[in-house]
Amino acid sequence: MRIEGLLLDVGFEGRDAVVWVRDPDQGRVKLREPYHPEFYAEPRDVTPEELKTILEEHPDIKDITIERRISTIDRSGEKIVLRIRAKDADSFRGVSRLAEYLPLVARIYDSDLTHELKYLSERGLIPLSGVAAEADADGRITSIRPLGLDTRIDPPPLRLLCFNADLGGDGGKVTTLDHALQPEYTFEGPLRVVLHDFLDYFADLDPDIVVAPSSQLAAVLRAAARLGIRRFGSGEGEPVLWAGRNHLVPPIYKRLGLAGLVERVLFTRSPARMCAGWAAGKCIDTRQCYEARRRGILVPRAADYQPVMTLQEANDMDRGGLILAPTVGLHEDVAVLDFESMFPNIIVRRNVSYETTGRPEAAEGFIAGFTQEALTRRLHFKRMRKAIEKGSLDWLWCEERQTSLKEMLVVIYGYSGCFANRFGSMDTYMEINRVARDSLVESMNAAAEHGYHTLYGNNDSLFLQRSGATRADYEALTEEITRRTGLPMALDTIYRYLALLPQKADDRFGAINRYYGVTPGGEFNSRGIELRRRDTPPFVTRLQQRVIERLLTHPTAEEVRTTGLRLAQEEIEAAIRNLREGRVPDDELRVSIVLRRASADYSSHPGHVVAAESLTMNHAPPEVGTLVEYLYVDSDNSNPFRRVKPATYQGGRVDLEKYVALAKAAAATVLSPFIGEDVDLEVPLHPKTIS
């Protein structure tokens, strides 16, 4: 039997690996092959043969062989180790722990990797990409190989089911959602009827990706089991779906999107159910382990790398990135030049890796290979996006893909010197920083030679100004900088007006990544201010946006400083009046923050944790990773449980003066280049002169 299709997932049953493939002609196909997970043990004070004799007596060990394996990323070192294979996945942990604590074992390798990673890396397979397999009539694999990656914009033909469920003792409601999480169909009525109809729908759709809150999915599965209705997973504890289906919670799906999820899976080489919620560092660690195993390199345990140096030594050795402090104030006709994916490009173009630092003649570095793959894919989707109508489905897929890849690429550089990186090297991290600093200085020199004034420089970008400069002038400068540095630089944005903001703590100095501006075409951009924060109430976000618009939509800078300031003040004072007179609905005042862990695990009581605990006490606990929304009711109360309430609670007072303070703070941010941070909006504004 030949199977060719999309690799959905890998699981383990007894002594078999179970591979789920969606074949266009045969549907969901279950394949099996023997799986005996291995790890490697380095002998101490005994010969390999003696250690082998001792361990062979363990009943859960299938076999042991003595091998010579590569022990370093640069392939210069080798070790004589024992390759120990457990009988099955269930017995692996006990066998590896026995070896780890045996005095005759100096070190073990490949022991803390997931079984999915072991299986996939051994065969070079990649989830959510194509595979071709041959199997017998019982589904036993005789051969399996990857089909490679493509660069299509649309996601692979995955079947997606999103739903919400509200089940009671006798009745309930299940609502299915479309890819944008908007309601589609509703099943409502007696509990047995609702579940029967919904699970029939589930069977007909046969989804590969299921998006639902964990508690709601578990409730559906438990109720189906209790009523004897067919089901597709287990709801005991964390819900588990069967038959290669992957479960995601809505916040992760909303953040990544389906196409972004696919890119994360392709990068990590791990199933979607595992990697979707991982931090970027874990994604990179998993990919590094996959690549090391493909190269036959022993993988040390995650805690084995610990750079030893004092803080003073680290400071002396590494100067970090280069930042030129912003020139605070309102500026006209400013261009932002940006190195495209600077740190990944340094890794790829300068071949900076753990084993190549200081060796310019070295072969392609360990991290350069997979960084280049991700970088090439990201730049491809960024360029495709530019040629597609903004807001279209194709545009959205390109955006999801390139954003997902960006999450990985921006962290590879920092993770290279991280204490948690089992292959890490501070030398690599510092070399990337050195090249970045030198490149930014070279860029500033090139700009100065052509009469440009640098208003602000931040690691990989320059904010430049020159009277009369055109887009063509700036693009010519980017070409020269690219030639001189060997790193691609592009013209990112041209601003008609740009306000560079001061630090909150000391307005004599410019703040890093804190500005707002408007392009000649009327597009407003900002960084580091309240409207960019998710925990800013919608009312304050929209107020700050309107203040910026009132301020900057004028033909001359002088009018910005006069008419613009007057209109901005009027906007602010009208908003404050609306607040105090109760004309702002509570929904506009909610604060939204992600609950990063269970509320009981927090040692302090910030607002979202208090709201989460209140919901928990009322039998509606929010899930970890979801947004918790709350309202201020008495922000100065000494009891944290009286300061806020969950936004879903109806009635009661709202602390209007707290929201007035938030509105004033947002206004002060925008107006700070003109009047200073200590804004009192109850009195007339007196703009200061800005050069």
Image (cartoon, rainbow, N blue to C red):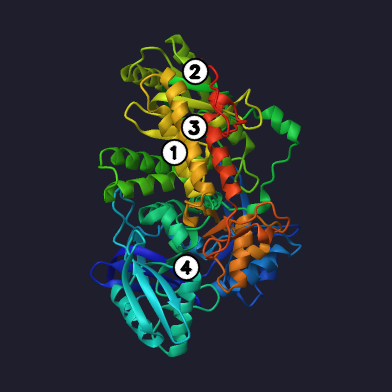
Q: Look at 73% across and 55% down and name the residue there.
A: 638
N-term-proximal mark, 3 vs 4: 4
Q: Are marks 3 and 4 in contact (CB under 8 Å)?
A: no
Residue 25, given in percent of the width and then of the height, sits at: 23, 70
N-term-proximal mark, 1 vs 2: 2
Residue 213 is tagged as: 4
Name the image quarter holding residue 101: bottom right
Could you say which is closer to the camera, residue 160 or residue 146?
A: 160
| Residue type beneath disc 3 | Gln
| Residue type beneath disc 2 | Thr
N-term-proximal mark, 3 vs 2: 2
Residue underneath mark 3 = 569
Residue 123 lies left or right of residue 284; in this view the side is left
N-term-proximal mark, 2 vs 4: 4
Q: Look at 33% across and 17% down and name the residue there.
A: 470
Q: Look at 50% across and 56% down and name the residue there.
A: 586
Give the Cα separation between the discs numbered 1 and 4: 33 Å
Q: Quadrant of the N terminus?
A: bottom left
Give the Cα separation between the discs numbered 1 and 2: 27 Å
Judged from the image, the secondary structure of the residue bearing numbered disc 2 is strand
Q: Residues within 10 Å of mark 3 (few under 14, many from 20)?
A: many
Give the Cα separation between the discs numbered 3 and 2: 31 Å
Give the Cα separation between the discs numbered 2 and 4: 49 Å
Residue underneath mark 1 = 545
Could you say which is closer to the camera, residue 542 or residue 205?
A: 542
N-term-proximal mark, 1 vs 4: 4
Q: Is residue 346 visible?
A: no
Give the Cα separation between the discs numbered 3 and 1: 13 Å
Residue 490, given in percent of the width and then of the height, sits at: 38, 27
Residue underneath mark 2 = 454
